[in-house]
Amino acid sequence: MANLDKYLTIEDLMKAAKRRVPKMFFDYADSGSWSESTYRDNTTDFEKIKLRQRVAVNLENRNLATTMMGQPVSMPVAIAPVGSTGMQSADGEIKAARAAEKFGIPFTLSTMAICSIEDVAENTTKPFWFQLYVMRDKPFIERLIDRAKAAKCPVLVLTMDLQILGQRHKDIRNGLKAPPPITPKFLFEIATKPAWALGMLGTKRRTFRNIAGHVTEAVDLASLSQWTATQFDLTLNWKDIAWIKKRFGGPVIVKGILDAEDARLAVENGADGIIVSNHGGRQLDSAPSTIRVLPEIVDAVGNRTEVLMDSGIRSGQDVLKALALGAKGTFVGRAMAFGLGAGGEAGVTRALQIINKEMDVTMALMGERDVKNIGLHNIYSNDLQKRQGY
Ligand code: GLV
């Protein structure tokens, strides 16, 4: 394994992943819908927020540990559910889950993962979180929830912003499929990505294993877009939270909240937490960035539920900005996917180390010793007034 210490930023890992992962799968991670304006805003809006520097504060014994959904975490960063993670690197979900458990943070497995709930449970020692997409086949969804329970997943993440798939031009142009069709073009490409290809040849996990063999209907699983178009339940609504919660019997957090009114509705309908998310800019293009809407959502429900956020977090500074604006914790998807592509499990660990170090140093330079004390007072105030005028 290459020395990963040379990668100093998530962008470094992204560039390495681009060299090592077939274009179809790298592009799947590095894309947003339509013009990708929301995808871009998710990161550039973080840059507009300025932090307040304080000096002459005792900086001994700094602490990044806190809790997310009552679970102790070594830093307020969980791994987001990312579809097809096992196509960034063979057995990618297992590798990322192992990196997360060693780091002391939650890993969230996607319904649309390559490795199944059982694959990840058999190859890890600590419970991971499970993300649920609701499909038309209700008995299948009930069994999926039961499988997450059997694997002792402590938290269920119910995604509500993807009943139809946002149009992603890169995926359409690349003919995205898992497993990929073996065309001359693809064979030519993997000749330059031998480590990826060797890994894939060495695993049996090459399709959506939460689903394959578990649905009664014979379906072509290879294309995510076709699968969502035909299988996802278009009637998913707030009332569904109740039966999902009852079936799961543990905390259910609702992912995909980008509006204060929806945040209220999620809480009123029993959500135990919410994830402020625009699905990494992959669904409604022209929706606002999550860091922009976070404060109004925290104002609406922050005293009634745990507000978490994702979309656009590429550094420890971004995590601190989200906390300062009221999030209790954050999720990283692409940082994990790029780490995985760059260096497998060690690459995910490297991504987490990068974020952890950025958080620690930034927190110190802001004159804070404990991540639990981060708040609005850490934001340079002129920017607070300007927030409305992005
Ligand atoms: C699936 O969750 C995707 O965004 O591709």
Image: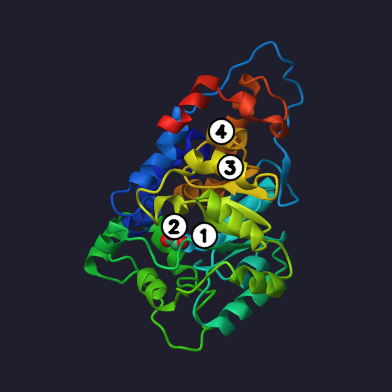
Q: Residues within 10 Å of mark 4 (few under 14, many from 20)?
A: many
Tell me how far mark 3 sits from mark 1, CA to CA.
Answer: 15 Å
Which element is circle 2 on? loop
Which element is circle 1 on? helix
The residue depicted at 36 percent of the width and 69 percent of the height is: 225
Amino acid at pointer 1: Gly
Between 355 and 313, the one nearer to me in the picture:
313
- According to the image, label 2 marks what residue? 88
Which element is circle 3 on? helix
Say which mark, if any, is on residue 321: 4
Q: Residues within 10 Å of mark 1 (few under 14, many from 20)?
A: many
Say which mark, if any, is on residue 92: 1
Dot 4 or dot 3: first in sequence order is 4
Nearer mark to the viewer, of 1 and 4? 4
* Quarter of the picture holding the C terminus: top left
Dot 2 or dot 4: first in sequence order is 2
- Mark 4, ligand 1, within 8 Å: the answer is no
- According to the image, label 3 marks what residue? 352
Dot 1 or dot 4: first in sequence order is 1
Tell me how far mark 1 sits from mark 4, CA to CA.
Answer: 29 Å
